[in-house]
């Protein structure tokens, strides 16, 4: 885990205005309302290139809604999203993918009638409109390499239904990697995993960062995240309550209160 010398030792919910030059991916004053419900409330944070940022919060805190607003799935009610210095607030998800931002989803939706390698091969095709019979040899070879990269090299011809939950997560990551991202947002990767599987997935995510991919990992599993991340942002009820390095996050009283009755810190 790397250390950012510009990061303070205290986990404080900083409220300064952020701009396009503050990180590779910047949310400033992000707000999302659904009718009379405010799911994300004036939330600001920046992701620094090359880091693993943990985006943390109890269930129902607004983590996935923030993700959806930042990646073009939902239009935010207010606020600004910048990616690599450009305002992308109103861009749809497919345009964000073209820019180099990929994400995984909590609900895995692979093609059940296709092999693991074919699922990844189809994700390599830009417009996703192609038959497997039209896939060229180099596309399948690239898909095989990605499968090897995520630890599925020995399961290439199996089908998704033959994979355990941790294997399906690796397939989801592989499909995201097929878009050749600079920034990968990983949504709830540790849900349903054993401690050993959490450690193994953490090793994979660290290896991806070592290969030059910036990561944002969203989860409510504090124990799994704090041993992985360089820096954390913690939200509750759609608002930021803490930001800082892992040890400061762990010691923060507001974070402990938010997790009272949940994960042990």
Image (spheres, helix red, strand yellow):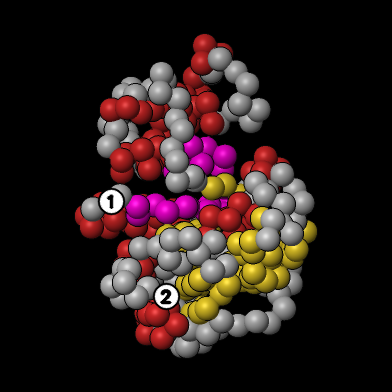
Is 1 situated above or below 161?
below
Residue 51: give x, y in percent of width and height: 50, 66
Residue 207: give x, y in percent of width and height: 39, 55
How far apart are the alpha carbons under marks 1 and 2?
23 Å
Which portion, as a residue range, is magenta? 173-191
Residue 17: give x, y in percent of width and height: 72, 78
Mark number displayed over residue 193: 1
Is 183 situated above or below 110?
below
Q: Nearer the viewer, residue 139 or 181?
A: 181
Badge 1, how many Cα within 10 Å: few under 14, some, many 20+?
A: some
Location of the C terminus by quadrant is bottom left
Mark 2 highlights which residue?
258
Location of the N terminus by quadrant is bottom left
Which label's residue is closer to the chain start, 1 or 2?
1
| Disc 2 secondary structure class | helix
Task: Name the residue: 39% across, 52% down.
Answer: 189
| Disc 1 secondary structure class | loop
């Amino acid at each position: 885990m790397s250390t950012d010398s510009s990061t303070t030792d205290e986990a404080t919910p900083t409220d300064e205005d952020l701009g396009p030059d503050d990180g590779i991916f910047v949310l400033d004053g992000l707000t999302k309302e659904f009718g009379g419900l405010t799911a994300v409330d004036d939330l600001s944070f920046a992701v620094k290139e090359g880091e693993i940022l943990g985006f943390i919060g109890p269930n129902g805190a607004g983590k996935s809604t923030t993700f959806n607003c930042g990646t073009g799935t939902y239009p935010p009610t207010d606020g600004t999203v910048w990616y690599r210095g450009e305002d992308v607030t109103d861009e749809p998800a497919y345009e964000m993918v073209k820019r180099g931002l990929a994400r995984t989803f909590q609900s895995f939706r692979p093609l059940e009638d296709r092999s693991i390698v074919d699922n990844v091969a189809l994700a390599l095709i830009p417009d996703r409109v192609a038959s497997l019979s039209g896939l060229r040899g180099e596309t399948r070879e690239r898909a095989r390499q990605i499968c090897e990269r995520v630890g599925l090299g020995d399961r290439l011809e199996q089908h998704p239904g033959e994979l355990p939950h941790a294997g399906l997560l690796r397939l989801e990551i592989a499909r995201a990697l097929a878009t050749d991202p600079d920034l990968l947002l990983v949504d709830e990767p540790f849900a349903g995993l054993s401690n050993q599987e959490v450690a193994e997935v953490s090793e994979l995510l660290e290896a991806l960062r070592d290969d030059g991919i910036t990561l944002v990992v969203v989860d409510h599993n504090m124990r799994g995240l704090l041993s992985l991340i360089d820096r954390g942002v913690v939200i509750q009820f759609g608002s930021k309550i803490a930001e800082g390095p892992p040890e400061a996050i762990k010691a923060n009283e507001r974070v402990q209160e938010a997790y009272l009755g949940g994960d042990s810190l």
